[in-house]
Amino acid sequence: MNTSSHEDVNSTQSDTAGKVISCKAAVLRGPGQPLVMEEIQVDPPQKMEVRIKILYTSICHTDLSAWNGENEAQRAFPRILGHEAAGIVESVGEGVVDMRKGDHVVPIFNGECGHCAYCKSDKTNLCEKFRVNPFKSVMVNDGGTRFSTKDGEPIFHFLNCSTFSEYTVLDSACVVNIDPNAPLNKMSLLSCCVSSGLGAAWNIANVQAGSSVAIFGLGAVGLAAAEGARARGASKIIGVDINSEKFIKGRAVGITDFLNPKDLQNPVHEKIRELTGGGVDYSFECAGNADVLREAFLGTHDGWGLTVLLGIHPSPRMLPLHPMELFDGRKIVGTIFGDCKGKTQLPHFAKQCMRGVVNLDEFITHELPFEKINEAFQLLIDGKSLRCLLHL
């Protein structure tokens, strides 16, 4: 369903508010199966919920993991995946006061209610009710779904978002209002990868001008961390990846040196220490691999090196560190969504992107119509895309 103008969307909304909407969605019916483009029913939003018309969505490695069904405990079918998107509010449920019909918004998988002890704390970006939860597949209000097939079969939700659908319903805590002048196609990246990487560089590491950085894993999140370090004035940004083709994109976001572990005879951390005179100030592990995490940790400077863990680690392996190694002053910390409080911080990120502080153009490597979503999945599987933007 293409949208020719904002006016057309608002005209449609006036006819659909409070009603069930029929639309297309890419439905996953089993692990590893091709997504099926189906006509589904989307219920109106309930109290403190928002129904959105999705205009753009893209695929993240987290979607890929869920599609593969890597964690059996997270399986729920049929299901609508997707959590990186941008769109326009179609209608709001009772009690929603910070959004209205026609607002430009991005969904966030790690919500912010603004009222709980977590949201009121400046020490965390988690939320008591709406934090990221890969096991959650229904809405908070009633434990039900807002999606169903034409025959009435429930379709489960994913990561508070379910954006692989022309319309979706989210808790209002998981929807961020952004500047209506911001380009929605690029703003979709703020839902996940860019905010996670930028937040890691700015909120967690607080990268300083003239500092040295190493990025392990040059996917979209890793490149966003590099972009954040570049924007902060880091003098040396080392990119580490086993796919040398990613170095081309890396240069565009400020990476100054590249290391492919396959080309090295010695461990990566030794080469990094050699390049930096003892190790980097900050390293970012974006690969989700325990051995890579150890290299990232050992590649930081003793006395003050900080390693930020961003990769999703599906393996049951524990941290590959001996407690005494922490006595050398190196630190390691994990982060979800770059420690961004979504509703509070993302509008600011959007404005910085609009001003050119952060360049989002390099992250969108492909664009396809929504109907070709399985091709977009394959591009990510083959390592050929950072983000393939799907037009709904």
Image (cartoon, rainbow, N blue to C red):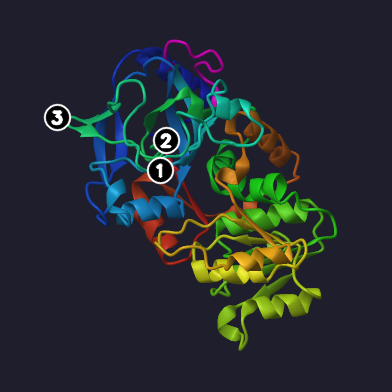
Above or below: residue 270 compared with residue 179: below
Residue linked to disc 3: 151
Magenta part of the chain:
92-104
Residue on which the image places disc 1: 82
| Proximity of marks 1 and 2: CB atoms separated by less than 8 Å | yes
**In front of the other: label 3 or label 2?**
2
Amino acid beneath label 2: Cys
- The CA distance from mark 1 to mark 3 is 23 Å
Q: Position of residue 298 (x, y in %)?
A: 66, 71
Crowding at mark 1 (Cα within 10 Å: few <14, some 14-19, many 20+): many
9 falls in the magenta region: no
| Left or right, 257 with reference to 332 | right
Label 3, label 2: how far apart the Cα atoms are: 23 Å
Give the residue type at disc 3: Asp
Quarter of the image for residue 342 reads top right
Q: Nearer the viewer, residue 276 or 16?
A: 276
| Above-or-below relation of 157 to 265 | above
Give x and y (percent) for residue 155: 25, 35
